[in-house]
């Protein structure tokens, strides 16, 4: 701000407007160019309007239906099932705006009154929110919902898409406790494995009894023990059925992911950690202990951190399982943490081999309630607790093994991520959902492409390149921010399905047509896209022929060696006196940096007459003759330099005017030998416009004859030269001036007698003019104040932050001072807009006053 103030100092006449302009540009450039050291920014940001205009969004929504939360793709991939509030839909996955069947309505009207009497909201909670939707077999779906805080389950016949009813015509329902949560806001997870439903959630009305259970199928139901050492205030986010090697000794398992309050740490406050747990698919419980309870339940801590910065991502949000080959399974999980009031998200990957090795390690134990947790150093019984041996029943386990499994559910070692660090760290984002796929580039290399949904309704697309993550783009999916409830990827069609409270969206995984040039297409590093030199378009690689010479470079993104330079059109800009000039230059990428040249000379940050605002443009605070010339804006990204904008700044055209005056007889007061001043006591000036070409010598003579009763003509408006030779030169100067073709005012001075005749009406006119001028100035002042307030709000929205629990204190303000003009609370993340120590004014402003036509 100081630098900007110094740059604007030479322009006192526009200091207020220029300072406000400068403040707005500072705030905008800070927001757009901020590169958080904790994570990289997306290369491109697509607004909702841009996504809509390009036809990249296709939505499904129905009146009076909300809370679209559950997505299920049929095994054949030909139907997309959607669970919402009081309804289930069957959609065409190629075009979700089309319903393949009429919707299934399943409300909880019979339980709504009871729900309200229990103190729940009639307008928000006492409905049937669909939470579980699985394909039970080839003919039926199994669906469960909250049913107005009375969980129920039912069956849907797939062929005609209707609820299965009894012989009396009533819907065939089952108890949904442990299958669907009571509260629609509670976290849960459920997965189907060989016709059996494995679910994890809070089982009671108050939400205080966690359970991991198995239901459906022909085998007896199973559940977890109520010991706090098993589950303590858990929040379940995902589950996955993993099949082991058919030729091995291990049985198949179900893995669960959740957060819980850790009891093994000794702190005054609660410590929440992320866990991975597993149970054996063939577990039947114990004979004398843990009857119909898991004997194979084990859990371990998931580690995802930045060790060098001592930042631990302890809150897991979602998990995605990627199977690249038989026996090769990788879990991808998204975590969040709050650092200094800012949400920071991370993605960590865990290989199945590392998970197995962790569960084969030692256990933790607490010998007494007043003793510390420590590593168990005794002998581990055989068979090993938690092992899932194929062909052996848990009913045959010895009591010592079952007892040890009940008392030692936590293993000592943590599960470390692949590479011992996160694959991706993103600041100012709160990831809620995740999907991952493997995409093969034209060069034959396989790349992991990840899609992360946020609680603000945006979608990030990223790629892992040689261990480094590159955020390809950020997409704003909704006109207003809203959380994304579910994310489903259909690789065969290249589509993503996004469920939110208001609608379901269908989004293609790539929009190659958005890259207009070869450089943009290559620098995007999107494995779905490549540049077709023949058609000069960026196209989907699925359309590429095997022998086609398409351009793609995912590993290096060497656009300078692969793409020709793009021409740029020069635009002419005129300087307006007294106003700053903004030359706009917006790079096509958030990762690009700008370089400005003036007549071939590169401008530096030390320039006084120029101020470069990243991603905004170049501000000439006090443009003048020294500012004219050629300005070129170059962008630099990944070693690729190209011209983005070119301006030819010129001064405004000069005008030449001639003034002819007729004066009344005057009294000459001698002052010096060089000059005599002519004064008229009472005069009136009436401008008459003529063309300069009409004011030749004869015209001047005619004007002199018409005013012969007055004093001789004078070429100067208010003074005449003392020399008598000056009148003689009037004719020559008039003839010279007659060669121009510009507008020339003719001023006629009338005597006092004529002026007095009109003095009454003109006095009234002067009063009216004065009143109008005063009113205009008042309106202008109100307008400036209004624009200043609007700019302050705009700056707050641009910074996107929220006040922390303890208000931050700007430089120069003492803690506890709580000056409203020193700290500006804005939405997300936390920033303080500091007072400038020189001007004592906040960084607010208005849009540019003298902006280039570009």
Image (cartoon, rainbow, N blue to C red):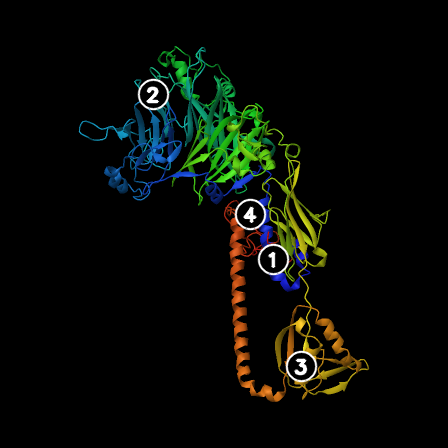
Report if the CB atoms under discs 1 and 4 are less than 8 Å apart: no
Location of residue 135 in the rendering, given as x and y in whole percent from the top left corner: 34, 25
- Is residue 825 visible to us here? no
Report if the CB atoms under discs 1 and 3 are less than 8 Å apart: no
Compared to residue 32, the image places residue 363 above or below, namely above
Report if the CB atoms under discs 2 and 3 are less than 8 Å apart: no
Cα–Cα gap, marks 1 and 4? 29 Å
Location of residue 658 in the rendering, given as x and y in whole percent from the top left corner: 69, 73
Cα–Cα gap, marks 2 and 1? 69 Å
Give the number of the mark in front: 4 or 2: 2
- Is residue 439 visible to us here? yes
Q: Mark 2 highlights which residue?
A: 195
Cα–Cα gap, marks 1 and 3? 43 Å
Give the number of the mark in front: 2 or 3: 3
Location of residue 132 in the rendering, given as x and y in whole percent from the top left corner: 34, 30
The residue lying toward the viewer, choosing from 692 and 303, is: 692
Q: Is residue 335 left or right of residue 129?
A: right
Q: Mark 1 highlights which residue?
A: 850
At x 52%, y 44%, the residue is 829
> Considering only order in the chain, which callout, 3 or 4, is on the residue closer to the N terminus?
3
Q: Mark 4 highlights which residue?
A: 831
Which of the labelled discs sits on residue 703, or is there none?
A: 3
């Amino acid at each position: 701000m100081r630098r900007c103030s110094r740059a604007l100092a030479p322009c006192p006449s526009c200091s207020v407007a220029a300072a406000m302009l400068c403040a707005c540009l500072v705030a905008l450039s800070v927001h757009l160019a901020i590169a958080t050291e904790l994570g990289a920014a997306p290369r491109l940001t697509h607004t909702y309007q841009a996504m809509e205009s390009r036809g990249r969004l296709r939505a499904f929504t129905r009146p009076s239906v909300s809370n679209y939360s559950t997505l299920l793709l049929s095994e054949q991939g030909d139907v997309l099932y959607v669970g919402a509030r009081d309804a289930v839909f069957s959609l065409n996955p190629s075009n979700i705006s089309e319903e393949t069947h009429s919707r299934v309505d399943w409300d909880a009207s019979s339980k709504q009154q009871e729900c309200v009497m229990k103190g729940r909201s009639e307008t928000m909670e006492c409905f049937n929110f669909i939470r579980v939707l699985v394909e039970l077999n080839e003919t039926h779906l199994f669906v469960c919902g909250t049913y107005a805080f009375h969980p129920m389950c039912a069956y849907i016949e797939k062929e005609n898409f209707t609820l299965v009813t009894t012989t009396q015509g009533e819907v065939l329902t089952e108890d949904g406790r442990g299958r669907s949560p009571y509260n629609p806001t509670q976290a849960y997870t459920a997965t189907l494995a060989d016709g059996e439903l494995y679910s994890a959630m809070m089982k009671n009305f108050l939400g205080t009894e966690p359970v991991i259970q198995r239901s459906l199928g022909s085998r007896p139901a199973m559940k977890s023990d109520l010991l706090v050492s098993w589950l303590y205030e858990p929040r379940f986010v995902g589950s996955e059925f993993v099949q082991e090697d058919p030729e091995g000794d291990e049985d198949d398992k179900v893995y669960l992911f959740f957060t819980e309050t850790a009891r093994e740490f000794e702190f005054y406050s609660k410590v929440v950690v992320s866990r991975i747990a597993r149970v054996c698919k063939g577990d039947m419980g114990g004979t004398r202990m843990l009857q119909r309870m898991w004997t194979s339940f084990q859990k371990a801590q998931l580690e995802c951190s930045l060790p060098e910065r001592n930042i631990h991502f302890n809150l897991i949000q979602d998990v995605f399982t990627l199977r690249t080959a038989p026996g090769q399974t990788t879990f991808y999980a998204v975590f969040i943490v709050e650092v200094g009031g800012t949400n920071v998200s991370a993605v960590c990957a865990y290989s199945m081999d590392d998970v197995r090795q962790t569960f084969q390690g030692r256990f933790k134990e607490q010998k007494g309630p007043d003793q510390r947790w420590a590593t168990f150093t005794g002998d581990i019984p055989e068979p090993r607790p938690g092992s899932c041996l194929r062909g052996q029943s848990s009913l045959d386990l010895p009591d010592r093994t079952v007892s040890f499994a009940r008392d030692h559910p936590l293993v000592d070692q943590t599960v470390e991520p692949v590479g011992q660090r996160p694959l991706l760290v993103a600041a100012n984002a709160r990831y809620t959902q995740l999907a991952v796929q493997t995409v093969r580039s034209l060069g034959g290399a396989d790349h992991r492409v990840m899609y992360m949904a946020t609680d603000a309704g945006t979608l990030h697309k990223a790629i892992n390149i040689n261990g480094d993550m590159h955020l390809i783009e950020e997409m704003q999916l909704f006109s207003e921010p809203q959380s994304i409830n579910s994310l489903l990827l259909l690789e065969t069609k290249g589509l993503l399905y996004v469920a939110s409270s208001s609608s379901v969206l269908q989004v293609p995984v790539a929009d190659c047509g958005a890259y207009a040039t070869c450089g943009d297409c290559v620098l995007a590093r999107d494995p779905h896209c490549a540049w077709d030199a023949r058609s000069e378009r960026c196209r989907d690689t699925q359309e590429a022929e095997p022998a086609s010479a398409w351009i793609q470079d995912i590993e290096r993104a060497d656009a300078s060696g692969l793409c020709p330079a793009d021409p740029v059109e020069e635009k002419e800009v005129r300087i307006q006196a007294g106003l700053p000039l903004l030359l706009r230059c917006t790079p096509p990428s958030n990762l690009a940096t700008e370089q400005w040249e003036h007549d071939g000379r590169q401008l530096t940050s030390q320039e006084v007459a120029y101020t470069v605002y990243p991603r905004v443009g170049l501000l000439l605070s006090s443009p003048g003759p020294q500012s004219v010339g050629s300005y070129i804006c170059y962008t630099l990204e990944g070693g690729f330099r190209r011209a983005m904008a070119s301006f030819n700044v010129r001064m405004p055209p000069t005008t030449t005017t001639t003034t002819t005056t007729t004066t009344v007889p005057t009294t000459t007061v001698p002052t010096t030998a060089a000059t005599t001043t002519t004064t008229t006591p009472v005069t009136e000036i009436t401008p008459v416009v003529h063309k300069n070409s009409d004011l030749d010598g004869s015209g001047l003579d005619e004007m002199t004859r018409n005013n012969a009763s007055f004093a001789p003509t004078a070429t100067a408006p208010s003074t005449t030269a003392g020399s008598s030779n000056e009148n003689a030169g009037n004719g020559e100067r008039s003839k010279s001036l007659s060669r121009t073709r510009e507008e020339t005012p003719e001023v006629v001075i009338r005597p006092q007698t004529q002026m007095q005749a009109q003095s009454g009406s003109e006095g009234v006119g002067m009063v009216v003019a004065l009143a109008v001028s005063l009113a205009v100035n008042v309106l202008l002042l109100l307008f400036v104040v209004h624009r200043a307030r609007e700019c302050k709000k705009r700056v707050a929205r641009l910074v996107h932050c929220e006040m922390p629990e303890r208000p931050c204190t700007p430089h120069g303000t003492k803690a506890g001072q709580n000056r409203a003009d020193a700290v500006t609370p804005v939405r997300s993340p936390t920033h303080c807009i500091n007072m400038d120590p020189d001007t004592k004014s906040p960084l607010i402003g208005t849009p540019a006053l003298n902006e280039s036509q570009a």
